[in-house]
Image (cartoon, rainbow, N blue to C red):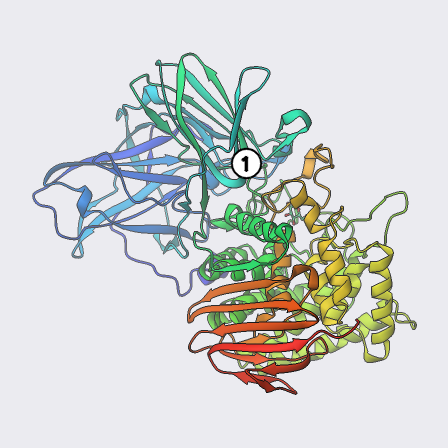
Amino acid sequence: MNMHATASRKGLKQRNWAAEMIAPLSDEGVGRPASFVSKTFSLEAVPAAVELFISAQGLYRCFINGKRVGEDLLTPGWTNYDHRIAYQRYDVAQLLVAGENHIEIWLADGWYRSPLMWGKDAIPNCWGDRIAAIAELVAGGRTLLSTDANWKSGALPIVKSGIYFGEVYDARLAALSETHGSEVIAFDKALLVAHEAAAVRELAALVPVDQWRDDEGRLVYDFGQNVGGYVRYTVRGSAGAQVRVEHSEVLGPDRFFDNRNYRTAVAETLYTLAGDGDETYAPYFTFQGYRYARVTITGEVEIVSISSVPITSVAEIKGGFESGSGLVNRLVLNAVWSQRGNFIEVPTDCPQRDERLGWTGDAQVFAPTACWLADSEQFLRKYLRDVMADQRPDGAIPHVSPDPTRLHPEHFPGYAGSTGWGDAIVIIPWVLYTHYGDRAALGECFDAMVRWVDFVWSISDGPIVRPPPHWGDRGFTFGDWLQPVGDNRKPRPTIADDCAATLYHFISTELLGRIAGVLGRDDLRQAMERRAGEIREAFAFEYISASGRLAHNDQTSYALAFLHDLVPAEHWDAARGHFRRVVEDADYRIGTGFIGTPALLPALTKLGMDDLAEKVFLQEEVPGWLYQVKQGATTIWERWDSMAPDGTIYDPDMNSYNHYSYGAVCQWLFESVAGISPDPEHPGFARVKISPTPLEKLNPVSAWHEIAKGRIEASWTMADGKVEYIVSLPEGCEGLFVPTVRHVNPVLDGKPVTGDTLMAAGRHLITFEIPKSN
Ligand code: BGC
């Protein structure tokens, strides 16, 4: 077992197991009927407290005496199963009886062995080909029952299930029979760690907002919200009758039920009725990404009720932003729903197609927003352990984690090492440190960070990174993925891979220096500061012309270079002018992709070009954040041009309507527009930096954020060139008002202020005037 395996379990809770990992002998392999293992056992008396410790290869659901244990979904969860597997603990005394008891553990393919990745290259059995369970009942340190070779097994009514596939359930097979035994299999119990983050749970069910019959008489339901989750229904009908549910995120023109963008993900459920009264069904071991459901009935079936059940690992929302713009408010809500639907055990790119993978680039750009909107600390800490487990021997960080390709490189060779994506290993821990004061995250990931930054230096053995052009080549980069070119007959400027890669080379090297400083690793701090200096110089030489124009003259270059202070003072004003012209020449339309977009508006407001930031943010044409909201989006789209104004969907081969990456703009709404940001010098909101950017067209604005210490609230209203800004800080949280040129004659709690001013916890009023013109 390589050192990274043990490293990724360091500090995690583990236990000694009496139980064995047992595989059902009824199992016929991936894509075949699911199986259960079971045991009937007697208890003289039921102890007051009985704990069940349980885990599995594949997904499991446990029942004791016919009652379900807990409400967690998709257990044991998704990790790099060759490095660590989560176990769960439940109190089950209330399910047990004195005398004969029966326990069943249902098992299915899940992420462990159902095909992952896309199309003809999908990889089955990514982490292994045998589903199995390990479980024990413990009372007062005494093991009452544990999995061993004496357990029985048999087939489940789940005839087939898969993460992309969906599920086929035949209720006529619900009466389980123990047709087979079980086998103890070789298994390293040291892999088992206590579940690291909140379990996946259901959110409140959504009832249909509309329904109709299509030309073929099928019922189509609109649940009004695109989610990651599943459709649950109750039906009545005859034995053998069937209910097939298909899913889609969008309707094309004429309400065309369009899910071509699911690609090879079947994403359906098929339920066969037993015919005995009311039957309720929702899939056990999979989920879909959808807003609409199309129901095809075969035979005699009455639909008694139907709803859409969103599921997520982040059930509680911890932050909100409201403004005078209904479109903007909906956009923020869309980011919340995209986080919910893609934070299901792993931060995924999308929940609907044959992908649903833990893309590192997406996770790093969205991480700050994820922490503003929900408590994402343990969820992202767990993800970072996945990423470290997938780090390659040469330091390359995977494109996706948990990475199905790491053990199967023949399918997708070299699926690691892209700048902008791999930098997640440096950036996400820093976000957790600033937002939660989580210094341990820095320490736990530090070695992996150093190995990554050294990998990037090694790509071209120097400060300028020259990525090779082909996927799979060592050092290949996604650049600024999906950077729009506008009209391709007269394309707008875009950034070249080497420039994008070198920008992130600098970003991570400089940040690693800061992190080394926080951890007291002065040797590395100095080394990284030196190296960052080298990259900064090389960047200026390579990409900044004498006139201050950046080589590619595109929005991403200017945004990232200005945000990370890579533009030398002597070129600052000229480069700022070029930046303004590039945005104006694009009619204030966005010219950035996955890595440029989170930097665009923060860079514009950093440079005091609030007028541009407001125009770009509020323009409603493609590419733009508000176009998709106007088109009826209820989550964030993968592409700016995902749908034409007439509803026709763009290029179904890569077009998700639930991708949180562009939702990263919410960080700017909290930190610039509402003016509250965490202070890395005083992490975990021990101090809040306060410096609002009032934009007239968003007037009035209010934001809130729940932190461990309590609730931060900030709001401003603007009238007649004056702004009233109210901020309230919980105990243990101080504020630092940072006045800038956009705050003329600032007055804090009745006293004029001239410079940065500390504020104690409590409620404060700041007033200032708006500068006459920008
Ligand atoms: C994914 C993105 C990812 C990108 C990188 C896409 O297929 O959906 O989320 O960042 O690939 O290439």
* Image quadrant in which you'd find residue 311: top left
Please indicate whether residue 280 sits to the left or right of residue 400 in the image: left
Q: Nearer the viewer, residue 169 or 219?
A: 219
* Image quadrant in which you'd find residue 368: bottom right
Q: Position of residue 491 (x, y in %)?
A: 87, 48
* Residue drawn at the location 79% of the way across and 65% of the way down: 558
* Residue drawn at the location 52% of the way across and 45% of the way down: 341
Vertical side of 714 occupied by 494: above or below: above
Q: Position of residue 644 (x, y in %)?
A: 74, 36
Check the image and name the residue furthest to the right.
547
* Residue drawn at the location 41% of the way across and 56% of the way down: 197
Check the image and name the residue furthest to the front.
720
Name the residue that disc number 1 marks: 290
Give the quarter of the figure containing the C terminus.
bottom right
Secondary structure category for the residue under label 1: strand
Residue 84 in view of the camera:
yes
Q: Position of residue 36 (x, y in %)?
A: 32, 32
* Count of marks, rendered view: 1
Q: Nearer the viewer, residue 314 or 424?
A: 314
Residue 638 in view of the camera:
no
Vertical side of 681 occupied by 578: above or below: above
Q: Position of residue 303 (x, y in %)?
A: 41, 22
Q: Hey, what amino acid is under mark 1?
A: Tyr
Check the image and name the residue furthest to the left.
44
Please indicate whether residue 327 sits to the left or right of residue 772 in the image: left
Vertical side of 656 occupied by 446: above or below: below
